[in-house]
Each structure stands twice: as C-alpha cells, then as structure tokens.
C-alpha cells in the first residue's frame, strides 16, 4: 500500500499550497483592502479574532473574492481531473477535456441563449450543460459500432463535431447583435460573476463525479496499457470506457457552465503531474485535480490584478499554448 502513503503526502502538500495561495489571492484585487490582510485572515480563521477585519473588508471578501477563489478552485479541480482521465483514456498527453466536443457543445448552448436574449434563471448554465452532454454523447454514439468504440474513431468524431459546432457558434455570434460582447466574454472564460449559488451548484456535482472516477483508477491504469492488456486483466473495457467518458464529460460540462471555456488546464496540469508523481492514476488523479485548482486560482488572481481585468481564459492560454508547443517539439508529437 505504498501508493496510499504517496497519495496522502502529495494531497496534503497540494491542499496546503491551495489554502496558502487562496489566502494570498484574497488580498489581491483592484480594490485595496486594509494592510496586513493576510495576517488578519489567518488570525480570524485560527483564533476567532473577527474584529480585526473592517466591514468593508468583510463585504468584499465574502461577497466578491471568496466566491471567486472557491469557484476557481472547483473549476480547476474538475478540469484537472477530467483532463487526467482523457489523457489516460486516449493514452496521449495532448488530450484534454474538450477533445470529444464537450466545450464546443457548452459554447453552442450558452451562446445560443445569449444571442437570442433568453432571460431565465440559470439559463446560460443549463444550456451549456445540455449542449456539452449532447455533444459528448453524440460523439460517443457516432463512434460506437457493434457495441465497440475504437479510440481513434472517437477522436476523429470529436474533431468533426468540434468543427461543426464551431461554425454554429460563429453563426450565432453574427446573429447576437447587442449581446455580442457578452457572448465573446463568455467564450473567453471568466469567473467575475462567481457567487455562492454557483458554488452550491458545482461543488457537490464535482466531488461526486471525482469520487466516482477515483473508483475506476485501477481500471484506468489497465486501459493505459492498451485495451487488449486491460481485457486480459479482467477489465470490462467497453463499459469502463463509457463510464469514464460519461463522468468526465459531466465534470467538464458542470465546470464550463459557470466559467465559460477555459482552455489548457486539463492539458498541461495532468502532464506536469505525471512527470512529478508517475503514471499511476490512483495518485495522478487526485494530485492533478488539486494542482488544477491551484493553477486556476493563481491564473484568476493574475487576471484580476490591476485596474483592468482580463478574462481568465486568456491567462491560461498564454501559459498553456507555449507549453503545448513545447510538448510538440520535445515529445515528437501526439503519439508519444
């Protein structure tokens, strides 16, 4: 049970780092709070010294910054976990949660609601989730024949669906009129509208989905060796593939529905953690999820630093795109 010791140590270390990063992030923003805020928050948490924080500090922290930091951690956690599963499933470090059209489906649903001015509670979130899941399950349906789903076919179908939905999104943007700015901002990835309702909606679903995926980490280890090897080890390959893809798609859909399209988290984080902790998904899955949470909290802190805020998706792309090029140059392409 050596892996239990390793996963415990890594998880505790990353959780501690996530807490520290979140505390630092809470003191950074366009509105300057009282001095020594970091120390005051620590004293408030551990010693109950609530009178150290001014009413203005409490209002900004509780209403604006804490929901945003927590939601960034949840979204990063979900994308990191989903990316790990996708890379293990496809046996390709270039894979990410959007590879089977989940993000494109979410974008189509959300932009349609924005473009047509549909104003209902949680309209964008619901449309994004429906669009993401419909796209994912359509790709899986198209790729499956005689109860068998070849990975290569799944990948090609995902690319085709992404291209088609990308054209639909472009058409919707042309029709969006006065709502064009809102639609583009959503597509860039954002967390500026984070609130406690979003957290109450996403947190249980993400934790449930992650827990379900963790139950299949040994099967994912077997799949990483190849489908024939997994079958010889007693894994029900097709059923496991359906479960992994389905739950990963749900995780991604839930995350994207509240944050817009945030790229590269599910690509670069699992790859980095695989280098650090190895390919065992019993360790890789939880550590990648926690590292994804840390990465997105840091990226969103950078995005809102200064007077002019930028969408967090731009920050992750500025970091992720060069790393993707590095992979292509140094790993010999996607097949590595």
Image (cartoon, rainbow, N blue to C red):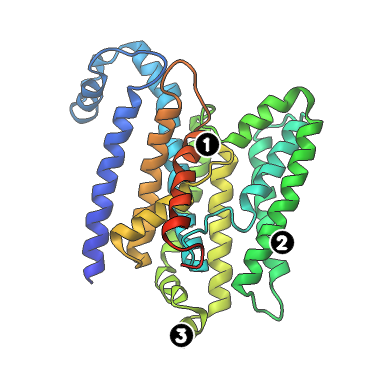
Q: Is residue 208 left or right of residue 249?
A: left
Q: Within the image, what quadrant is residue 286 found in? A: bottom left
* CB within 8 Å, label 1 to label 2: no
Mark 1 secondary-structure assignment? helix
Marks 1/2: CA distance? Answer: 26 Å
**The N terminus appears in which quarter of the rendering?**
bottom left
The residue shown at (50%, 62%) is 333
Question: Is residue 112 positioned above or below 94 on the image?
Answer: above
**Disc 1 designates what residue?**
313
| Badge 3: residue crowd in 10 Å (few <14, some 14–19, many ≥20) | few
Reading the chain from its start, which is encountered first: label 1 or label 2? Answer: 2
Q: Position of residue 90 (x, y in %)?
A: 52, 67
Mark 2 secondary-structure assignment? helix
Reading the chain from its start, which is encountered first: label 3 or label 2? Answer: 2
Residue 300 visible in the displayed image = yes
Residue 78 visible in the displayed image = no
Q: Is residue 284 left or right of residue 6?
A: right
Question: Is residue 289 positioned above or below 279 on the image?
Answer: above
The residue shown at (66%, 48%) is 104
Residue 234 is labelled as 3
Q: Nearer the viewer, residue 118 or 146?
A: 146
Residue 138 is labelled as 2
Mark 3 secondary-structure assignment? loop
Q: Residue furthest bottom?
A: 232
Question: Is residue 62 positioned above or below 136 on the image?
Answer: above
Question: Is residue 320 positioned above or below 96 on the image?
Answer: above
Reading the chain from its start, which is encountered first: label 1 or label 3? Answer: 3
Residue 83 is labelled as none
| Badge 2: residue crowd in 10 Å (few <14, some 14–19, many ≥20) | some
């Amino acid at each position: 049970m050596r892996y239990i010791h390793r996963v415990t140590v890594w998880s505790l270390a990353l959780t501690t780092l996530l807490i520290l990063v979140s505390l630092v992030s809470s003191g950074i923003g366009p509105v300057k709070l009282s001095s020594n805020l970091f120390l005051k928050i620590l004293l408030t948490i551990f010693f109950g010294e609530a009178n150290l924080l001014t009413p203005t500090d409490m209002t900004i922290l509780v209403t604006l910054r804490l929901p945003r930091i927590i939601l960034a951690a949840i979204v990063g956690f979900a994308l990191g976990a989903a990316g790990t599963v996708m890379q293990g499933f496809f046996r390709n470090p270039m894979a990410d949660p959007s590879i089977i059209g989940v993000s494109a489906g979410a974008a189509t649903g959300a932009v349609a609601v924005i473009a047509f001015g549909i104003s209902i509670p949680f309209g964008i979130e619901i449309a994004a989730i429906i669009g993401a899941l419909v796209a994912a399950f359509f790709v899986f349906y198209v790729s499956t024949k005689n109860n068998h789903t070849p990975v290569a076919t799944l990948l090609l179908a995902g690319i085709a669906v992404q291209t088609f939905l990308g054209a639909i999104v472009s058409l919707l943007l042309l029709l969006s009129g006065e709502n064009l700015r809102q639609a583009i901002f959503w597509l860039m990835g954002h967390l500026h509208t984070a609130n406690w309702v979003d957290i109450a909606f996403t947190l249980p679903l993400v934790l449930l989905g992650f827990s379900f995926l963790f139950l299949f980490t040994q099967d994912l280890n077997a799949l990483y060796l190849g489908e024939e090897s997994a079958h010889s080890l007693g894994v029900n390959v097709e059923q496991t593939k359906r479960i992994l893809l389905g739950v990963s798609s749900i995780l991604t859909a839930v995350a994207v529905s509240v944050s817009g399209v945030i790229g590269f988290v599910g690509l670069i984080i699992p790859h980095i953690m695989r280098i650090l902790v190895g390919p065992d998904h019993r360790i890789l899955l939880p550590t990648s999820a926690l590292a994804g949470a840390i990465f997105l909290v840091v990226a969103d802190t950078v995005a809102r630093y200064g007077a002019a805020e930028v969408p967090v998706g731009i920050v992750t792309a500025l970091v992720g795109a060069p790393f993707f090029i590095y992979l292509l140059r140094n790993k010999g392409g996607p097949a590595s």
